[in-house]
Image: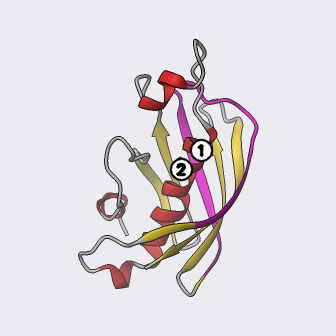
Amino acid sequence: MKPEVIKKYLPYQEPFLFVDELTEVSENGITGHYTFSRDSFFYRGHFKGNPVTPGVILTEVMAQIGVVCLGIVLMEKELDTRIPEIALTSHKIDFYHAVLPGERVTVISERQYFRFNKLKCLVRAQNEKGQLVCRGEISGMLK
C-alpha cells in the first residue's frame, strides 16, 4: 500500500493529524515523520516561557504513525472506501528527551502481533540528531 493511500484512510484532520510523511511501509512495520509546528495549540500552556511537547502528544504521534497507519496496511483488503474505526487499548511509553517546537521526529514501529483485529507494536521516536526521544508498546483495536 502506498503512503499517500494510507494517509487518505486516516480518521484525523488538522489540528489533530500528526502524520506528515511515511517513508517505509511493510506488513511488519512502518516508519514516518512529523514536524511540530511552532504555533501548535498545546505549546501555549505547556510550559510557561519554556514550551515542550507534551508526552500525551508524543504518544499520539507514535500511535497515529506506528499503530493506526500500520493497521490500515494490515486491513487493506477490508477497507473499501470507508475509514477504519480505531481505539487505543493500551500503552506503556518511556520518555528520554524533550521535543521542542519546530522539531521533527521520526517514528519507527515494529509489529508484535495482529490477531482478532488487535494490533500491538513496539514503537520508538527519535529526533533529527538520532537521539531516542521515547519508546514503548502501543496496542489498538481496528475495525
Residue 91, quarter of picture? bottom right
The residue lying at 59 percent from left, 32 percent from top is 128
Query: In the figure, 112 relative to 36: above or below?
Result: below
How many callouts does the rendering have? 2
Depth check: give the residue in front, 136 or 21: 136
Three-letter amino acid code at disc 1? Answer: Val
Q: Is residue 139 magenta?
A: no
- Counting from the top left corner in percent of width and height, residue 101 is at 51, 24
The residue lying at 48 percent from left, 31 percent from top is 42
The residue lying at 26 percent from left, 80 percent from top is 80
Q: Is residue 101 magenta?
A: yes
Residue beneath label 1, please? 56
- Counting from the top left corner in percent of width and height, residue 74 is at 47, 77
The residue lying at 57 percent from left, 78 percent from top is 118
- Cα separation, mark 2 vs mark 1, equals 6 Å
Residue 125, quarter of picture? top right
Pick the quarter of the image with the N terminus. Answer: bottom left
Query: In the figure, 26 relative to 75: above or below?
Result: above
Which element carries disc 2, helix, strand or loop?
helix
Residue beneath label 2, please? 60
Magenta-colored span: 89-114
| Pointers 2 and 1 in contact (C-beta within 8 Å) | yes
Depth check: give the residue in front, 110 or 121: 121
Question: Looking at the image, can residue 117 be seen?
Answer: yes
Query: In the figure, 91 relative to 82: above or below?
Result: above
